[in-house]
Image: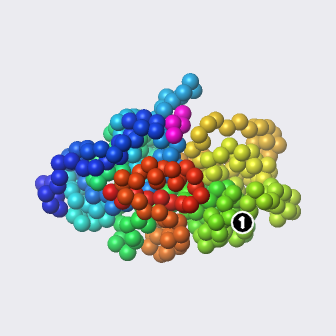
Amino acid sequence: MNSQYINSLPKTMSAIVCHGPLDYRLQEWDVPTLEPEEVLVRVKSVGICASDLKCYQGAPLFWGDKHRTGYCQTPVIPGHEFVGEVVGLGEGAAEKYGLALGDLAVSEQIVPCWKCRFCKRGQYWMCQDKHDVYGFRQATFGAMAEYMKFPIGALNYKVPTSIPVHHAAYIEPLACGIHAVERGEIQLDDVVVIAGVGPLGMGMVAAAKLKNPRLLICVDMSDDRLEIAKLCGADLTLNPSKVDVVDEVMKLTDGYGCDVYIEATGYPPAVEQGLRMIRKLGTFVEFSVMREPVTVDWTIIGDTKELTIHGSHLSPYCYPIAIRMLEQGLLPMDKIITHQLPLASFHRGMDMVASGKESLKVTLTP
């Protein structure tokens, strides 16, 4: 079967293009062309992630320093939280992905190589050879544009039309939250603490609630966000600016500490807080993309508490679960997606995410 297109498409499009830290420009860019098994979508909604903000601000993880080589390649179109309408299908793509022209679709944020040791073992989210995540690498331009391409090797899913498009852009962060919760290996009698209830943390709360822990506690500096966390399933919320959260958790657990601690703040002090708060033989999940290296007392991890430390990266095998959770209305999405801005308001959106005072999840509409 030959390539299919929903109608004649323009040659160029508006796009946000990253040229370097703080150098993001709205400009004209070529509409992607299709090869076999590739998918072209008209972007309906794209979220601004905390990692987008850190890249924008010049964090070493993305731009490099004396300790590492930067991950971001320029010029590149950012955006890895998105949903789009299928407007083009390369030869074989319809059959491979079960997609038709006019469908809503998402693609997992990483496009694996499928050839390295990890990909061959089904651990594709840790792809060694390419590790191409949409919006940071030149092989995988992102969604802050009118159109984007899902290249060969991508993991694509049809999105039910019952999910509003600005809610569907939340599939990616929700899937990441689900994976972090799975890494916590939560048991029915556990006391679970989730530190940081931004957009990703909200998804973790909803996913952790499905595990039925004995007590689900959320920690954040914003009372407004803590109120939304209750709607996601939190049993108890604590604000570190008002109470000693470590002391409170110790009181609630007869002095033992929480069983599982998930760090999703992106701030180094939350790591130390978790190490103090967690019980001996507890499970610590580190999710955040930190702007700078974190220094802690590793003796706590080893000799003092013998902790299980789990990292959490991306969202393997979690997109279908995230789609189902949104279909079932398990999150208060109208309170999570707080702002929808036009693509041209990209810089305003970044400022809103940076301040965190008036917004939770900011999305752009090309």
Residue 244 sits in which quadrant? Answer: bottom right
**Chain part drawn in magenta:** 57-61
Quadrant into which the N terminus falls: bottom left
Would residue 2 be seen by someone viewing this image from the given angle? yes
Picture mark count: 1
Residue in the picture at 79% in, 49% down = 276
Please name the amino acid that badge 1 sits on.
Thr
Regarding residue 171, the answer to whether it shows in the image is no
**Secondary structure type for disc 1:** strand
Q: Residue at x 54, y 33 (%)?
A: 60
Instruction: Name the outermost residue toward the top.
Output: 66
Please say whether residue 145 is one of the residues in the magenta stretch.
no
Q: Is residue 308 left or right of residue 328?
A: right
Residue placed under numbered mark 1 in the picture: 237
Please give the name of the residue rendered at 67% of the width and 38% of the height, measured from the top-left corner. 294
Image: 136 above or below 250: above
Point out residue 311 in the picture as x, y percentages from the top left corner: 60, 46
Vertical position of residue 3 compared to residue 269: above or below: below
Report the side of 44 relative to 321 (left or right). left
**With 235 as the anchor, is 135 left or right in this view?**
left
The residue nearer to you, when weighing 246 against 38, is: 246
Which of 100 and 291 lies nearest the eye of the viewer? Answer: 291
Counting from the top left corner in percent of width and height, residue 169 is at: 42, 61
